[in-house]
Image: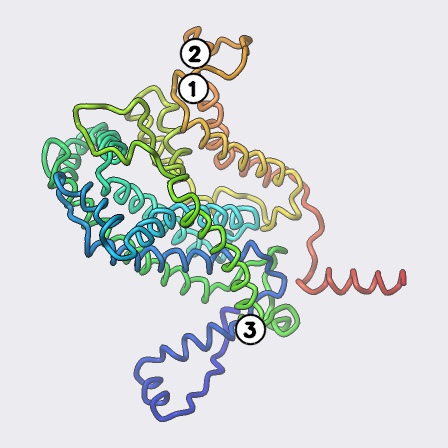
Amino acid sequence: MSEHESTYVPKTGIEKWLDSRLPIIRFGADYMSLPTPRNLNYWWTFGGILMLCLMTQIITGIVLAMHYTPNTALAFASVERIMRDVNGGWLIRYVHANGASMFFIAVYVHMLRGLYYGSYKAPREMIWILGCVIFFLMIATAFLGYVLPWGQMSYWGAEVITNLIGAIPVVGEPVLIWLRGGPAIDNATLNRFFSLHYLLPFVILGVVVLHLWALHTSGQNNPVGILIPKERTAKDTLPFHPYFTVKDGFAIILFLILFAYFVFFNPNALGHADNYIPANPLQTPAHIVPEWYMLPFYAILRAIPDKFGGVVAMFAAIGVLFVLPWLDTSKVRSMRYRPQMKIFFLFFVANALLLGWCGAQLPDAPVVGDFKTFTLIDGDLNSYLWLTRFATLYYFAFFLAIMPWVGLKETPLPIPASISEPVLTDAAQAEQKG
């Protein structure tokens, strides 16, 4: 697949002139005819969905930037003016705000798919690493954008997160002052955050191009997790167009229906009500929480009693993803043929959801019901902190202990010799039974 030869033939004089100077049409045509594993399922459609989300965020963000005022005295009012006075402003704003959530839903599914099917294994390490860079940039961009409406949760979210940087020894305080533009969050901070929030989506787009380039070079993974030899390309692959463009198009339509539901019928469901209150540095909200897609990392941050240790753990939760290709010791890619690892993976998914739930709770919130069995933290029975610490422990144990250990000890199931073999074998067996 990485040795796919170009089949594009320029027909008109303009195409020939452009092809000899900037072969952009050839690049698109070659991508459409790229041999693609014929067994790709709908979990592979989230790559196209993510590109749609990125372009939606860039386009709506450019329009919003035309009307937004990055000033602490005017920012909240400018957002309200967009909602009330700008033609179609409410729609652009709701698409952009809910688009961030849709973006993270798609990227989490995309990454879990890669984790389950071993898409990070050689020779695709660079594809995975670039994907992790995109994920990190997405988190940074989302945080910066969350501050811009300048509501209560925006201001206090910025206060909490920027203060964490100050916990870093030696360099923390200078970096904090540089990021804020002064000793406290003010106009300079909002201007910096607005500039970076506007810039980073284009940086993400650049990294996406590198991500696709690496994918074009190393080739697609597939649910079976086997490399396709050149001699079997014709049997085990299909052209990307029209087979997978139609399949991706259908999945994108379904995704847009979900997107439209939130935009038109429940636009504030994924946000926080306190962000419709103007920022007030003198009034701290009862519960400061980030957006839902950052809650697992926020829970990890709170699980560590030491402030600097919490910052290290939070960044380590993302950093461990970068070295994942070297932590997995199994020679089998797909967990479809690794029954033991599949169980741990399902626990990992449930654990990630648990971390998100814990991140949304008050640290000293009462436990639901009359559960009075364990005394784990200073005799306090009414705390979610012990559950958060357990979930944090499993998160890191999955990557640093379980994955290397299971890869060495497990006995995987037999792997088919080719993509088409299981299909042909099942068909032959059905024919014999018939």
**Mark 3–mark 2 distance (CA, rounded to whole Å):** 59 Å
Residue receiving disc 3: 242
First of labels 1, 3 by sequence position = 3
At x 67%, y 41%, the residue is: 339
- Compared with 341, 245 (above or below) is below
Q: Which amino acid does label 3 sit on?
A: Pro
Q: Which amino acid does label 2 sit on?
A: Ile
Q: Residue 377 carries which label?
A: 2
**Residue 406 in picture, x, y percent from top left:** 60, 37
| Pointer 1 with pointer 3, Cβ within 8 A | no
Q: In this view, does 167 lie to the left or right of 219?
A: left
State the residue lying farthest toward the top.
379
Which callout, 1 or 3, points to the residue nearer the camera?
3
**Residue 97 in picture, x, y percent from top left:** 34, 47
Residue receiving disc 1: 385
Q: Residue 166 carries which label?
A: none
At x 54%, y 50%, the residue is: 118
Classify mark 3: helix, strand or loop.
helix
Q: How crowded is mark 3: few (under 14 residues within 10 Å), some or many (20 or more)?
A: few
